Amino acid sequence: MQKKLIALAIAGAFVAPAAFADSGNVTIYGKVSASYDITDNGSGVTAAGATVSGTRTNKVSSNASYIGFKGSEDLGNGLSAVWQVEQQVNIDGNNATNGAATAASWNSRNTFVGLSGKSWGTVILGQHDTPYKLSTRSLDVFADTLGDNRSLMGGGNGGGAAAAFDGRQSNVVAYISPTMNGFTGAIAYVAGAEAAAASADKKGSAWSAMVNYSNGPWYGALAYEKHSLGSVNSLVNPTIAANTLFKGQAVVAAGALADRSEKAWKLGVGYKANAVRVGFAYEHTTDDFNAGSDLLGHNAWTLGGGYTFGNNEVKLAYTKAGDFNVLSNTGAKQWALGLDHNFSKRTSLYALYTKLSNDTNKNYTLGSAGYTTGLVAAPAASFNNSASAWSFGVRHSF
């Protein structure tokens, strides 16, 4: 596990000092993943009771494709300097993702510089996925596809949180401990006040932490994250739009969440041996958005697994988000079924079908601009819709 961790890493998200075997060398790495998708955002019902028809769309999508550069320098006495620059690449040629422009800077993904010691751990400064996010990413058998469980986990794509818990934050300082008897810990602080210009500005920030255990076929993780929302910079003045909250509830006004907070904790368990792998994660969120009391607090869980035969793996996953604290029928469920064919350790074909069904007062969406250009937006201002998608793709890592 230590070889897969540096700073906040799990399952290769960071690279440990051992991966930089030759001091001064630069390693180029990345992933290219594209799919042909057939999506349907399903019909829905507006708050006034009118039916909104769904749309069927064919598209070519890029799924978390990226290129990165990393390296280290041996400073002696067990100390190394480590760095990484990583950029998302939308290989479908779409430089905008459903209206959201792709980051133009050459560091849109995990990018950092830091120091690593064999005895005391690693410290980094930069932009990176939080420990909370990374704690259970390796348990998602459909990660970085339209079947990804983050449609509903980590706040989901439908107003389940003001700022995503399963997110990548800028302005991060993070520490990861060495592995001791199978246990590894990580903690990160997100500075949210760099743009503060007046004493009246609300200076948002965040804390994220996790501890994981890896021993043989077993993996376990416990994580916690808190957002102190501000009016400036990285945790900016979130506004929850009407069609991403739920019908029958007043919209949170712009600025109303500044100086408020939200938090979440998560438990994950995984097992992988021989031809079988299984992963389970459960999370609970709370906030003080409703005049100081809980507004969006809810539970969510996901269970998925795969069975390998020959060069193939069949996969199945189910994810469920429960009702928000203040209104019933605001949950949703998603299931996905897929098959991977591995030509080698680096190249595979994949096919999957996934469906997300909202309750009568909710409209989570399928997929996210954070990991696929093929996300399926819900019909405008509608609820009780069921989005679905077929996806056929090829993936190569280098």
Image (spheres, rainbow, N blue to C red):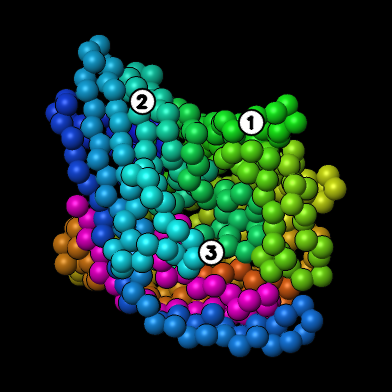
Picture quadrant of residue 201: top right
Residue 73 x, y percent position in the rendering: 22, 23
The percent position of residue 281, horizontal first and vertical second, equals: 53, 54
Determine whether, in the image, residue 292 is placed left or right of residue 210.
Answer: right
C-alpha distance separating marks 1 and 2: 26 Å
**Alpha carbon distance from label 1 to label 3:** 32 Å
Cβ–Cβ under 8 Å for marks 1 and 3? no
Numbered circle sitting on residue 114: 2
Residue placed furthest toward the front: 197
Q: Position of residue 70 (x, y in %)?
A: 25, 36
> Does the segment drawn in magenta span residue 375?
yes
Residue positioned 31% across, 56% down in the render: 89
Q: Earlier in the sequence, mark 1 or mark 3?
A: 3
Residues in magenta, as a range: 369-398
At label 2, the amino acid type is Gly
**At label 3, which amino acid type do we have?**
Ser
> Quick one: quadrant of the N terminus?
top left
Mark 2 or 3 closer to N-term? 2
Q: Dot 2, crowdedness within 10 Å: few (<14), some or many (≥20)? A: many
Of the two numbered discs 1 and 2 in the rendering, the one whose residue sits closer to the viewer: 1
Question: As shown in the figure, which amino acid type bears the numbered disc 1?
Answer: Ala
Q: Which residue is mark 1?
A: 196
Is 333 drawn above or below residue 75 in the view shown?
below
What numbered label is drawn on residue 151? 3
The mark that comes first in sequence, 1 or 2, is 2
Residue 320 drawn above or below residue 173: below
